Amino acid sequence: MFGTCSECGLAFAWGEVLHRERSVPRWAVEHPQGFSLMRGAQTFVRSFWPWRFWGAIRMAQPIRPRRLALFCLLTYGVMHLLIGLTAGVVRYVQLAGFNRQGVDISSALRSLAFLAWPYADPGGGLDLLSDGVLLAAPLIGGAIALPAGFLALGTTLARARVRRVHLLRGLVLTLPIPAMGFAVAMSMVNGSAAGWPGMDPSMRLLAVACAMISHAAAWWVIGSQYLRLEQPALVIVAMTTIAWLSWLAVAVWAEHWFWCVL
């Protein structure tokens, strides 16, 4: 049986209100039993199949911002670790080469610095940010800017009974897609510094493009299944285009300002 909220007009199933533990999937980070690394890992992996993922997440389910914040930290941690491992391996190869006598402890310790900050120049230069960051940064920036663009669609959101916290949930739970795209692109940039085959610029651009398309597709599923917007495909195409172009313009301006200051 279904009811309608007297305040916002949102339709909901009574079972989702009376039995919240049953309505929220056990693998979701917002499950009433609490946040755990296992639930975080399951949510992270399942988010790459958005159709099934958002078929289980509904607007009527309670939103827990603290859990979403923890999931953001988990997503960043996975991305940071993947990039750091690749950057550390590349730096070790550059310092020690292929040492058949065993592990070069000195080079290994110096390479560990890239686990703390893997976004520097993989060639060992003094640049705090490598070219890969400038290439892949629009993935993260666009992912953040995309739901913010929905705020301009006040009438459309009001008809669908969408609130800002619903957009926040969509932002956080889709972050693994651009985060992994960022990690892949950065790892390919680091690999090219070591001369690894198949790491040319065209492949890096392809990795970024695939992540952007996948993220836009996830938001199309969100618009149709979760937010239940009118004409979700048109809305998502417009919001995605505006978000990526806006963030790209900001990134170009920031790079220009940075070099002018230096």
Image (cartoon, rainbow, N blue to C red):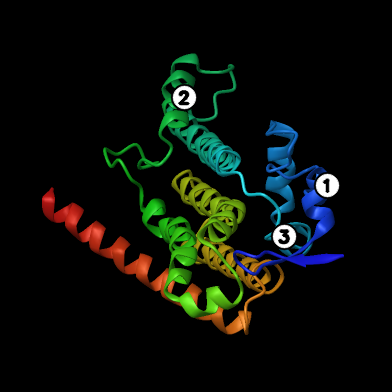
Q: Position of residue 87 (x, y in %)?
A: 48, 37
Dot 3 or dot 2: first in sequence order is: 3
In the image, 124: left or right of 57?
left
Residue 19, which numbered label? 1
Residue 112, which numbered label? 2
Which amino acid type corresponds to the residue marked 2 in the rendered image?
A: Leu
Identify the residue at horizontal 29%, vertical 39% (top origin): 125
Identify the residue at horizontal 62%, vertical 49% (top origin): 63
In the image, 56: left or right of 120?
right
Q: Indicate the secondary structure of the residue bearing disc 1.
A: loop
Q: Distance of mark 1 from mark 3, alpha carbons? A: 14 Å
Dot 2 or dot 1: first in sequence order is: 1
Which amino acid type corresponds to the residue marked 3 in the rendered image?
A: Arg
Name the residue furthest right.
1
| Residue 187 in sight here | yes
Residue 145 picture quarter: bottom left
Identify the residue at horizontal 44%, vertical 64% (top origin): 148
Q: Indicate the secondary structure of the residue bearing disc 2.
A: loop
Task: Tally the marks.
Answer: 3
Residue nearer the viewer, 224 or 82: 224
Name the residue tied to disc 3: 58
- Please tell me whether mark 2 or mark 1 is closer to you in this view: 1
- Say which quadrant the N terminus sits in: bottom right
Q: Position of residue 158 (x, y in %)?
A: 54, 74
Identify the residue at horizontal 42%, vertical 74% (top origin): 152
- Please tell me whether mark 1 or mark 3 is closer to you in this view: 1
Q: Distance of mark 3 from mark 2, alpha carbons? A: 43 Å
Q: Position of residue 9 (x, y in %)?
A: 64, 69
